[in-house]
Image (cartoon, rainbow, N blue to C red):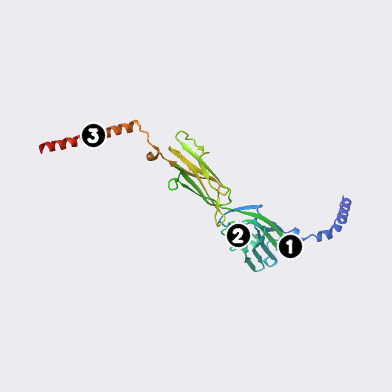
Amino acid sequence: MAVGEAAASRWLQRFLWPLLPLWCCVSPADFLKVEMEGKNQTVLLNDNVTISCKVSGSTPLDINKSGIIWYLKHQANETEHKVFVMYADIQKAFRPGASVSPAGLEKGDVSLHLPGVQLRDAGEYRCNVVVTPEEAQETVFLKVLASPECTLFPEQAMVKDDGDKYILCKAYRFYPEDINITWYTWTQKNPQGQEISEGITTGPAIKNEDGTFNITSRVRLEHNMTTYQCVISHRSLPTSCRLNCTQFRRESEMGHTWGPIETLIAVIGCIVVAIIGLIYCCKRYQIYIMT
């Protein structure tokens, strides 16, 4: 048994010794790794965001021997520029408010913090870490979304167009441009509701100066008591925005159908008016005779 172990030891030594120079030549960068949470990250417009980037293999980091550079590559023009740089006791933010927590460095956390994110902050971020003589980097794509402000105009925005009337539904300051507006209606005859397919006009999305969009949709009103619902769907919304409006029958514009009770009240009213008129005429006649 001892002879077998000795033979195995001699074989292992003969196998490993030729590999020792190759092992010594392995680049230290193979041991320094940068880890990010996924390849995509999403944030809402004007929110704060922290883009995670953690270093493994050389923690805790010695800031005197380390350098951190954050880059941003814009999707539109593919240009890349620095966002934040830190090395030794020097820190420089090329984007206002960008920062890396010094306290996190001791734990190998070089995550980038961005306050008040704007649409221009979207793009591919590259976390580059240098721990002399090692270097490692990873990337993540930051998506910026803007949730629409939804408004329904049931009365003020009723506009006449060739004799028809419309209810307006508007969505403001959303991004990206793709958005879906659907109309539904509920009536006494159809309390379950159904999607409206006719009488709808939805305009093009209008771009604002800040890069967000506005859009307006309208539906033609029917001549009966109806509840309308505007449903706005956008990728920034966890659930669709739903706005309701009930349109009541208007006698002055849509006519009126008399029921039996209303007819009876009208007849009684006429009789009362006739009696009062008759009494008034009789009194006037008596005064005339006496004079």
Instruction: Identify which residue, 244 or 57, lies in the foreground.
Output: 244
Residue type, label 2: His
Give the quarter of the figure containing the C terminus. top left
Mark 1 vs 3, N-terminal side? 1
In the image, residue 268 lies at what x, y percent? 27, 32
Residue type, label 3: Ala
**Do callouts 1 and 3 mark residues in contact (Cβ within 8 Å)?**
no
**Residue denoted by label 2:** 113
SS at mark 1 in the image: strand
Give residue 27's quadrant in the image.
bottom right
Residue type, label 1: Glu
- The alpha-carbon separation of the residues under discs 1 and 2 comes to 24 Å
Disc on res. 134: 1
Q: Nearer the viewer, mark 1 or mark 2?
A: 2
- The alpha-carbon separation of the residues under discs 1 and 3 comes to 107 Å
Q: Nearer the viewer, mark 1 or mark 3?
A: 3
Instruction: From this view, report whether residue 103 is shown above or below residue 201.
Output: below
In the image, residue 270 lies at what x, y percent? 27, 34
**Residue denoted by label 3:** 274
Instruction: From this view, report whether residue 171 is shown above or below residue 260.
Output: below
Residue at x 63%, y 66% (from the top left corner): 92
Instruction: Identify which residue, 10 or 100, lies in the foreground.
Output: 100
- The alpha-carbon separation of the residues under discs 2 and 3 comes to 84 Å
Quick check: 210 left or right of 129? left
Instruction: From this view, report whether residue 83 is shown above or below residue 219.
Output: below
**Do callouts 1 and 2 mark residues in contact (Cβ within 8 Å)?**
no
Instruction: Identify which residue, 159 or 93, lies in the foreground.
Output: 159
Mark 2, other Cα within 10 Å: few <14 / some 14–19 / many ≥20: some
SS at mark 2 in the image: strand
Quick check: 72 left or right of 24? left
Mark 2 vs 3, N-terminal side? 2
